Image (tube, rainbow, N blue to C red):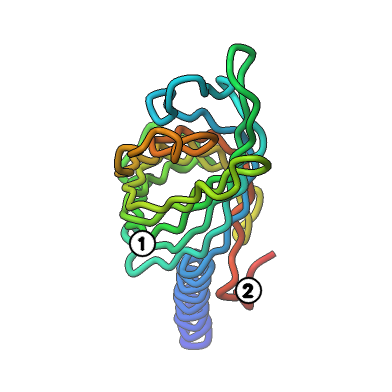
Amino acid sequence: MTSNYRLQKLGVLIIAIMSCVTLYAQKDTNKIKAQIALGVNSPSQSGFVTGFESKSLNFPTVNLGVQYMFKRQLGAKLDFGFNRFSNGDNSLEFKTNYTRVNAQLVFDPTESLGFLPQRIGIVTHAGPGYSFVKPLGNYGTNNISFLNVMAGLEIHYALTQRMSIYADTSYILGFGKDFEPETEGFGSFNGSLLTITFGVSFSISGCQYCD
């Protein structure tokens, strides 16, 4: 009896230790993540001067980011976005590069949403940043930069503890000044931008016990 009792206690202790290790490993994989995504963008037409208009959907949009979670549900990320858009059918010809850098708070409400399937997660993000607009070709001197505020929603599907694929829809509200004179706005842009991207999020904090 004594031997069996000791074995039972040892078994409980081992299970408890393994549970703690597993929980630690899961937190570790979620702590620091890198993200890369590719997609399309749609600029607000009010951001262009008369005679210029972009396509409704433009390719590419490229987003790169690093995310750090302070707690299981709350964190922050620093991310970079590159976008290119070009003229529509009824516009003067142009191409423009739109680059941004944003520092954002991240909120993950997945655990409190009990109706979600096991591998599905939802993450929201929002924060201030700075936008850099560079027209190409004939209008290359009309560069501008301005503050922005970005907000978005990500839907993740977990492939492993280390990696998930996700879709992100974000809106970048621009605070660019009016173009005075109007010629400074030829090929340039001072408005807001909608982006839709698909990407991969993966742990860079390490996990000794992950698959």
The amino acid beneath tag 1 is Arg
Query: Which residue corresponds to mark 2?
Result: 209
Of residue 92 and residue 208, the one placed in the foreground of this image is: 92
- Residue situated furthest top in the rendering: 90
Residue 162 left/right relative to 189: right
Query: Which SS class for mark 1?
Result: loop
Q: Bin the neighbour count of mark 2 within 10 Å (Cα to Cα): few under 14, some 14-19, many 20 and up.
A: few
Q: Residue at x 36, y 50 (%)?
A: 108
Q: How far from the left and from the top, in percent, is residue 8?
A: 49, 77
Residue 8 left/right relative to 62: left
**Where 23 sits versus 191, above or below?**
below
Q: How far from the left and from the top, in percent, is residue 196?
A: 54, 33
Q: How far from the left and from the top, in percent, is residue 188?
A: 50, 39
Q: Quadrant of the C terminus?
A: bottom right
Q: Quadrant of residue 202?
A: bottom right
Distance between mark 1 and mark 2 Cα atoms? 19 Å
Query: Which mark identifies residue 72?
Result: 1
